[in-house]
Image (tube, rainbow, N blue to C red):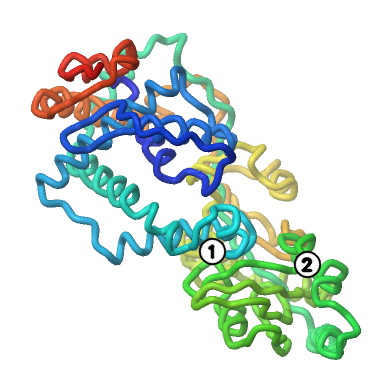
């Protein structure tokens, strides 16, 4: 169980597999058992096929690794049940709803999902109910074992000193960057013109002279739905949608088109295609009223006064972000840019080209002048950039990379704790391993305590 942390990723892969797969293996052979929890060969074979189909990376000896992952999960579930840990009905139902919505988005509609799966949404949820419950129990038990584990600076130093110097990672220059971002507003005359244009589209569709999806492909400024004729699958409870947009959509009956509505992205008309409870398929056309140089200049002047307060120390950058920034993605974390892993330390290649140019001559602690740019959605925007820190390219060291080293040391300590927990608990379980898998090196500890089935 040397790689026990990475095996928890495989635990998820086993319970969130694809809905349908051609020629799925049907097998009822029991390949392993922990207590009263059985592992079927079909569980392992189908999971491997699903991971491959979705482009995932399989570990060496995938059958052995997946059996080990399942053995770990079953043992944790048994202990969770013994310790009276529970998964609430509400929590389980929310997880199932999120999974089904994910599948609907993947396949395009509820009807296509049910056709591909050969099952109703209700049946799919029932198929996932027990696996989701087991995964949640296993995760709760794992957290119970390791959550109170801490790491001290002395332990971090000892851990770091065990790493051979030639094995220390090399880091490119990393930056911590924050920004205050505003979007200049178009003037009323331009907005009125775009509103009339959208009303014309609405009348054409309602008169039967144009199709909504054709107009969307031609005119929408939403790149995410342009090719699909403006179509999205939405749920009333999803937080990713603009509240105004969501509210307007769910007021519509099937086939009905909304009046022009205004969201944070621009102006829309929405057509309800179909609806089932809190789920719906809609089409929309987004038009972004153009912003002129006049509005951009006004935004720059406003931001210039904000910069003056920052430079004078009259306001912290975090306060300015909270008060003025219109970027929902960073408004509540002091405007900090984050990489794909959620870290605030970013390499230069992870920043947009305009930001790279702005940072070129900045020193740590500087605030940029208000900078106009065009974002990834082709919207004109103005921002003030704050360079909080910048590291030079370097070999890993305690001085420069303490937090990263501490996290690795903590992960290792937690993993060792889990190893010890399993070593002490495995002998207490009834374990059965099929003879075809007793040669798996990854489960030799389990095999040594197991009844080998013939």
Q: Quadrant of residue 372?
A: bottom right
**Secondary structure under the numbered disc 2 in the rendered image:** loop
Q: Residue 453: image x %, image y %?
A: 23, 19
Q: Residue 386: image x %, image y %?
A: 58, 53
Q: Residue 362: image x %, image y %?
A: 65, 45
Residue under label 1, please give it.
Answer: 312
Residue at 34% over, 14% down: 440
* Disc 2/disc 1 C-alpha distance (Å): 50 Å
Tell me if 240 is positioned left or right of 380 in this view.
left
| Residue 256 visible to an observer of this rendering | yes
Residue under label 2, please give it.
Answer: 229
Q: Nearer the viewer, residue 112 or 366?
A: 112
Q: Is residue 247 above or below residue 433?
A: below
**Secondary structure under the numbered disc 1 in the rendered image:** loop
Residue at 88% over, 80% down: 210
Residue at 31% over, 51% down: 130
Tell me if 439 is positioned left or right of 304 in this view.
left
């Amino acid at each position: 169980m040397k790689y026990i942390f990475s095996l928890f990723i495989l635990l998820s892969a086993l319970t969130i597999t694809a809905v349908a797969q051609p020629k799925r293996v049907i097998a009822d052979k029991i390949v392993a058992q922990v207590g009263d929890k059985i592992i079927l060969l079909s569980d392992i074979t189908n999971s491997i096929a699903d991971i491959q189909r979705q482009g995932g990376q399989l570990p060496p000896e995938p059958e052995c690794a997946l059996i080990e992952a399942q053995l770990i999960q079953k043992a944790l579930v048994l202990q969770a049940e013994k310790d009276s840990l529970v998964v609430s009905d509400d929590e389980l139902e929310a997880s199932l709803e999120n999974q089904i919505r994910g599948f609907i988005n993947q396949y395009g509609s509820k009807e296509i999902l049910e056709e591909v799966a050969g099952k109703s949404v209700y049946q799919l949820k029932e198929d996932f109910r027990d696996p989701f419950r087991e995964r949640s129990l296993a995760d709760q038990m794992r957290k119970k074992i390791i959550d109170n584990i801490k790491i001290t600076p002395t332990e971090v130093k000892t851990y770091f000193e065990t790493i051979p110097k030639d094995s220390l990672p090399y880091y490119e220059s990393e930056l911590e960057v924050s920004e205050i971002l505003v979007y200049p507003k178009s003037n009323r005359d331009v907005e009125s013109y775009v509103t009339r244009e959208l009303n014309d589209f609405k009348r054409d569709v309602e008169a039967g002279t144009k199709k909504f999806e054709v107009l969307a492909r031609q005119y929408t400024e939403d790149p995410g739905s342009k090719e699909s004729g403006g179509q999205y699958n939405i749920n009333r409870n999803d937080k990713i949608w603009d509240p105004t947009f969501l509210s307007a959509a769910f007021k519509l009956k099937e086939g009905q088109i909304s009046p022009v509505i205004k969201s944070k992205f621009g102006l829309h008309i929405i057509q309800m295609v179909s609806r089932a409870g809190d789920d719906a398929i809609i089409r929309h056309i987004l038009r972004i009223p153009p912003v002129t140089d006049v509005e951009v200049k006004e935004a720059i002047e406003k931001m210039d006064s904000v910069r003056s307060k920052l430079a004078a120390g009259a306001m912290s950058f975090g306060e300015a972000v909270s008060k003025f920034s219109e970027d929902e993605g960073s408004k509540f974390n002091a405007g900090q840019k984050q990489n794909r892993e959620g870290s605030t330390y970013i390499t230069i290649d992870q920043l947009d080209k305009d930001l790279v140019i702005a940072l070129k001559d900045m020193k740590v602690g500087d605030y940029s002048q208000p900078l106009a740019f065009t974002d990834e959605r082709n919207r004109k925007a103005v921002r003030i950039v704050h360079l909080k820190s910048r590291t030079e390219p370097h070999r890993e060291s305690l001085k420069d990379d303490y937090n990263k080293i501490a996290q690795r040391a903590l992960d290792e300590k937690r993993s060792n704790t889990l190893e010890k927990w399993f070593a002490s608990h495995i002998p207490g379980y009834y374990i059965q391993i099929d003879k075809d898998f007793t040669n798996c090196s990854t489960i030799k500890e389990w095999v040594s305590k197991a009844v080998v089935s013939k």
